[in-house]
Image: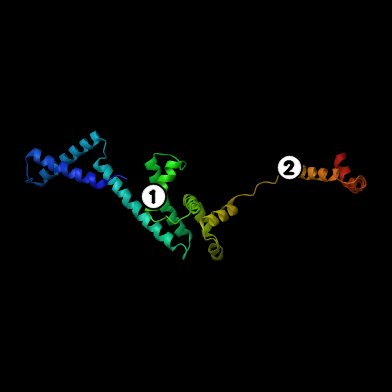
Amino acid sequence: MTDASSHIRDEANYLALWQQQTNAGKPRHAEDKKSQDAGAVGLYGRATREKGEPSPAQIKAEAQRNAADMRVILAGVKAWRDINFNCSLEKWRAVGAALNVGREQALRETKQNNTIGGKYTKALGKWIQENGFEGMAKNTRCWTLTLFDKYAEVSQWWNNLELYHRRRLLAPQSILSAYRAATTPPRPIDLRRNALSGFRKFMSAFKRMKETDAAALLAELRDEIMPLVMQ
């Protein structure tokens, strides 16, 4: 994370340098002050670009993002501490939103596009330890992030559940499992595969039968098998 305060101090130093170079001292008019400030910012912007450092606009944008992220993290930590006493889908969403901040930060730090690899895992683990989620099992963390990613679809299904059903779903894994079971269409039955499997089991047992028993079984099944053979 960029040390924004050090860049702000640098900006102030450039402002003082600009005022010294112009020998203006304290500006007489507001327009002179505005012009000096603009010149100082321009000087700072050029210098930071030359040094490869972020511009004032970039620093401001990052500070705003950090403030928004901190609000999300604080809400997530509070929800995580309350989850055992008052579990709900909204609380899991708050926890997932906070973990998502950590996930995005870990991806930025490692410059990766996916969440696979030792560098990402190490960066996320460090973030977890530093932000109040150190007691969360890795399995729970993964399910919570998945729930966060699918929250829009899951919440529509959740809102149509009876209250007693909701109370039975206390963990993100159970919520997602119930959601998938309710919304995934059943797989079509492969009748041919089932028939072949059944026939092979029949033949395996038939070959192990005594000859007299096998003959009796064939006689018993003749009326059912012959119409199929004659078709």
Q: Can see residue 101?
A: no
**In the rendered image, is residue 208 in sight?**
yes
In which quarter of the view is residue 48 placed? Answer: top left
Q: Position of residue 97 (x, y in %)?
A: 42, 53
Q: Position of residue 52 (x, y in %)?
A: 26, 35
In the rendering, which numbered label is found on residue 127? 1
Name the mark on residue 193: 2
Where is 47 relative to 83, above or below?
A: above
Quarter of the image with the N terminus in it:
top left
Front residue (pair 113, 226) = 113
**The image quarter in which residue 165 lies:** bottom right
Residue at 79% from the left image edge and 45% from the top image edge: 201
Most distant residue in the top direction: 50
Q: Earlier in the sequence, mark 1 or mark 2?
A: 1
Of the residues shown, which amino acid type is indicated by label 2? Arg
For the image shown, how many numbered marks are present on the structure? 2
User: Callout 1, which amino acid?
Assistant: Trp
Identify the residue shown where x is 24% and y is 47%.
5
Provide residue 102's location: percent of width, then percent of height. Answer: 40, 49
- Looking at the rendered structure, the secondary structure element under dot 2 is helix
Q: Position of residue 26 (x, y in %)?
A: 7, 46
Please tell me whether mark 1 sits on a helix, a strand or a loop.
helix
Side of 168 where 41 appears, left or right: left
| The disc label shown at residue 16, or none | none
Quadrant in the picture for the C terminus: top right
CB-based contact (under 8 Å), mark 1 and mark 2: no
Residue drawn 73% across the image and 42% down it: 193
Q: Residue at x 55, y 57 (%)?
A: 174
